[in-house]
Image: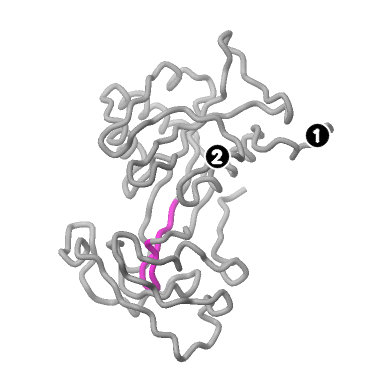
Amino acid sequence: EGPRERREGAAENPHKKARTSPYPGSKGERSQVPDEKVSWLVQWPDYKPVEYIAGSVLAQPTWADPPMGKRNFSNPAGRTGLVGRGLLGRWGPNHAADPILTRWKKDSKGKKVIHPVSERNVLQFVAIKRKDCGEWAIPGGMVEPGEKISTTLKREDLEKQLHKLFSQEHSVVYKGYVDDPRNTDNAWMETEAVNYSDDTGEIMDHLSLEAGDDAKKVKWVDINDQLKLYASHSQFIQLVAEKRGAHWREGMYSNCHD
């Protein structure tokens, strides 16, 4: 089955984070957009969004588009109460990659750990603790997954193992629009969440993960529904758990197995 898309549900599930104030990194308040007026299909002649582009973007770094053309792009999920690019460099979609590195949790004897309630194997993923908010997150970013993770973990000996892992068969679990507090009417985040699985444990088991400048910690985290993760990352992790038939939540499975 293909990756899940959320765009078609924008009218029924109006984006929340993309309408929050103040806008990240500023004191600017968005124009308020009620749920019933998020959709562009709803006529709203009095809509007057605030305009904001961060100074870091106006400085025209290499990753930013020139300051023109905003009216050519409309957020696919609807109104946000703010026009311009905000903190985002590109007009329209700004692409990110969220690589989810997983392995099966094992006991001291090397056997897979089974959750006592769900009777499903426990899956683990590599999580990074962000310095800016203290939340655990997928170590992704605006560049190629392998490069980003290597940079984040600051470990030269990761290069070989990561290259081997990223060369294996992988699974796209989500591709599309992301509800993000940086989104505007003219610029928004889209991501591709990809699961790279080290099922044998040969590649990642013996690495002691250490964080670089961008994080406090990096570690293997057990996957379950109690995780409090950054942005939309909990959704991506749940999709991986369901796809792999791993434990996610107590009480969600019957005693009958297919």
User: Quarter of the image containing the C terminus?
Assistant: top right
Locate residue 17, reporting x and y percent. 47, 62
The residue that mark 1 highlights is: 258
Instruction: Give the residue type at disc 2.
Output: Leu
Q: Whole-percent x and y of residue 117?
A: 74, 28
Determine the secondary structure under disc 1: loop
Residue at image position (34%, 60%) is: 24
* Residue at 26% from the left image edge and 25% from the top image edge: 156
**What type is the residue that disc 1 sits on?**
Asp
Left or right of 120 on screen, residue 82: left
Q: Which mark is residue 138?
A: none
Measured in 3D between alpha carbons, the distance from the residue under mark 1 to the one under mark 2, in whole angstroms, is 28 Å
Q: Residue 37 is drawn in which quadrant? A: bottom right
Residue that carries the numbered disc 2 in the rendered image: 227
Mark 1 and 2 residues: CB-CB less than 8 Å, in contact? no
In terms of depth relative to the viewer, which is nearer, 183 or 147?
183
Where residue 209 appears, as percent x and y from the top left, is 37, 24
Mark 1 and mark 2 lie on one chain; the one further toward the N terminus is 2
